[in-house]
Amino acid sequence: MVRRWVLLGLVTVGLLSGLTAGVWAGGDEREEKVTIDQVPAAAKAAILRETQGAQIKEIEQETEHGVTVYEAEAVRNGKEFEIEVTADGVLLEREEEVDAKDVPEAVREAAKKKFGANAAKAEFEKKTVILYEVEVKIGDKEHEILVSPTGKIVTDKDDED
């Protein structure tokens, strides 16, 4: 079970790295600070729902790959977190600060393996990314894709059985 969660975490980090690299390479990202009242109603409702009981520090409107998203930075109980939603209120991602003591042992060990003694200085964030898995059998082949809520295909896999 722990192995499964570690694998899921590594896959998530890999996907996020790929998505981030795509954004940097794409060159079509724009961002500007906005107020909650400038956010479309559906996105505003999602932000308020996800940040309930928190202080919203700032909101940025960003265009990534031609899709407008809203990233809200907030603080609850002294912990910072961010959420990203589409203009129509679909949650794309959540990031939150996590104390090292609350991170799974396997994650701390991976950090130690990669960074050695410097791992003691590490800051941890828990990232939750929303992806949809689509599976279809065509003939005798299984096909699977992972798709973001914005419609971007993140992975494409064919299995021959």
Image (cartoon, rainbow, N blue to C red):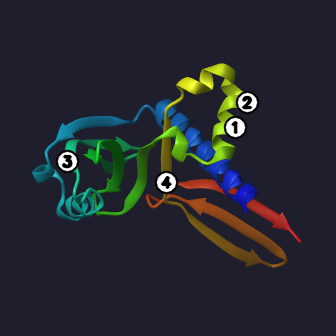
Is label 4 in a helix, a strand or a loop?
Answer: strand
Residue tagged 1: 109
Q: What residue is pinned by disc 3?
A: 55
The location of residue 28, given as percent across then percent down, is 39, 36
**Pointers 1 and 2 in contact (C-beta within 8 Å):** yes
Kindly identify which numbered label has been placed on residue 15. Answer: none
Question: Which image quarter: residue 79?
Answer: top left
Could you tell me which secondary element the residue under label 1 belongs to? helix
Can you give x and y, in whole percent of width and height, for residue 144 in the image? 69, 66
Q: In this view, does 29 lie to the left or right of 40?
A: right
Q: What amino acid type is highlighted by mark number 4?
A: Thr
Q: Where 116 falls versus 80 (above or below)?
A: above
**Residue picked out by circle 2:** 113
Looking at the image, which residue is at 67% across and 72% down?
Answer: 135
Q: Quadrant of the N terminus?
A: bottom right
Q: What residue type is labelled 3?
A: Gln
Q: Do the residues labelled 3 and 2 touch (CB within 8 Å)?
A: no
Q: Nearer the viewer, mark 2 or mark 4?
A: 2
Q: Could you say whether the residue bearing mark 3 is in a helix, strand or loop? A: strand
